[in-house]
Image (cartoon, rainbow, N blue to C red):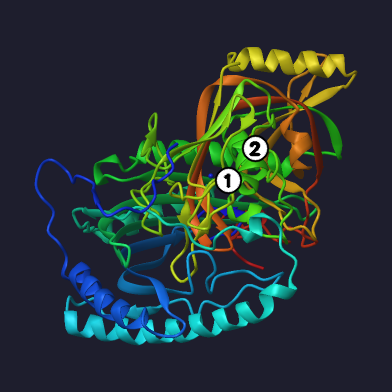
Amino acid sequence: MILFMGNRWIHVLCVLIALCGASTAVFAGPPDAPAKRSPVLAALQAEMERSFKALKAQDPPTYFLGYTVTDTERADVSGSNGALLNSTESRNRWLEVSVRTGSYTLDNSHKVGERQQANGGPGTPVPVDDDAEVLRRAIWLETNKQYEASSQALIKIKTGKEVKVETAEGKAPDFSREQPHTFVGSQVSINVDRKPWEQKVRDYTKAFRDSTAVINSIVTFSGQAQNDYQVNSEGTQLQFGQIRYRLELFIQGKAPDGMDINRYYNFDWVNPSDAPDDKAVYAAEATMRKELEGLVAAPINDPSVGPALLTGRAAAVFFHEVFGHRDEGHRQKDVTEGQTFSSKVGQQILPSFLSIVDDTTKKRLGSQELLGFYQFDDEGVPAQRVTLVDHGVLKNFEMSRSPLADFPHSNGHGRRQLGATPVSRQGNLIVESNKMVSNAELRAKLIELIKAQNKSFGLLIDDIAGGFTFTGRGQPQAFQVLPLVVYKVFADGRPDELVRGVDIVGTPLAALTKIVATGDTTEVFNGYCGAESGSVPVSAASPAILTSELEVQKKESSTDRPPILPAPAHDTAFAKTGGQL
């Protein structure tokens, strides 16, 4: 699993829906004015009714048909080292067709052994014009393509299924029956004047040129309006939109031994009026620059095991990687997965003072926007608050419409990137604690642990880039979290020492039991998580945590040395010669 920021990949989450009934639940729209039903939704519904009537009579029969059109409008502006890199606007629509043949119990999606059946393709672009005839023609062609792939897959599954060994969870139904929902929300759009942002990215990146340690700087602004239209044969009809803006700051340096040193910072907002002002951006840049300059000169930390304090953002990514991915429902069903938590429902997996929820209905936590917010997931199920761990006891999984024996329904976590098939994914993973102390007290407790273990130092993990984890059965059940800013905290009272080259490593069941206390301030990490169903926006939130034992290893390092010459603006020797070689 990978959590990344922007376009730079970095090796890096309750109410169960009732059984499908005859009635349709209607979710009220905004109280100010009724939303207008899009012609896109009408075209999808009309073609779905026509196609489903014909396909359910075929052999094999189609028992479920779903259509989704995603209309995306984007503006992107990037700058580097004081100059404009690009400035673009785009608009596109993407159609995805889900054709399921067979039955809810056994259909074309069934995984046999280690082989997952192909789904017939990732979808297709469709025109942005609201021309019902043209749109229905594109839907018709894609539906035929997906039915052919679905029927062939089901034939292969029925042929090979009986000779494969399956777990109990593997015998659970392939698709869950869910209550249909109707919601017609207002369509959203953005109107970005890119000219001011073009100047801002020039100015923001130019400010980094004063530092001799900064080799490269990139600042990217993006605005996106996305409208989703979903219909299915169960009766669901959805129209909803979401707007997001993001400003990403990135700088890179190199230590004398060739190790790359990176610093990141993001601003996320929804309302244009909440965009960060220049003062806030330059303050963030000053912190980034100071930390990068310190890290370039800092010593490398040796591998060690001992007490550690992770600040809130670092702890949030820790829980995302160590707990969150292993709690995704589809991993409990797949025989090739490690299934760390599959048999642990009702058992203690965390200290009793910790609880974990995934609340995708939550737009903000304090002043922070949460990237994992959405109204409906990519399978048409409403967003929900789901309690995953209650006072240390595992209670639930993040569920898509791929059910488990004891969890027969989705809880709104079927998610995907455009062009991928939804699986259960994290959204807004939030860690809650009832054993909180002030951050100052938490630091004091860290020093107590260092002394009690006869260590000379512990670690303070202050910021983090992301991480990754292995969940497959054929791989070590391990995780790796990638800190950016790490300090040694000494038992004898010496000042903290900034160190570099630290990666947190470990195994989940052991690591989760070592947490002894938390701070009293929750912090948020926003990013994008990559897994089987592509890259999806997520948030993780946690207070600082104190762990009695954390293992760290040396970070992978490049063999490339820093540039031989300084940057032209900092070449004082060249300047003294009057620019003559």
Q: Residue furthest right?
A: 454
Judge whether residue 489 can be spotted in this image.
yes
Residue contact between numbered discs 1 and 2, judged by CB atoms under 8 Å:
yes
The front one of 98 and 306 is 98
The residue that disc 2 covers is 345
Q: Given the image, on which type of amino acid does mark 2 rest?
A: Val
Q: Given the image, on which type of amino acid does mark 1 rest?
A: Asp
The front one of 233 and 223 is 233
Quarter location, residue 165 = bottom right
Horizontal side, residue 568 vs residue 296: left or right: left
Quarter location, residue 568 = bottom right
Q: Which of label 1 and label 2 is nearer to you?
A: 1
Distance from Cα at disc 1 to Cα at disc 2: 10 Å
Horizontal and vertical percent for residue 436?
58, 16
Mark 2, residues whose alpha carbon is within 10 Å: few (<14), some, or many (≥20)? some
Horizontal side, residue 454 vs residue 494: left or right: right
Judge whether residue 571 can be spotted in this image.
no
The front one of 138 and 575 is 138
The quadrant of the picture occupied by the C terminus is bottom right
- From this view, report whether residue 543 is shown above or below residue 73: above
What element does badge 1 sit on? loop
Q: Residue at x 90, y 18 (%)?
A: 454
The residue that disc 1 covers is 406
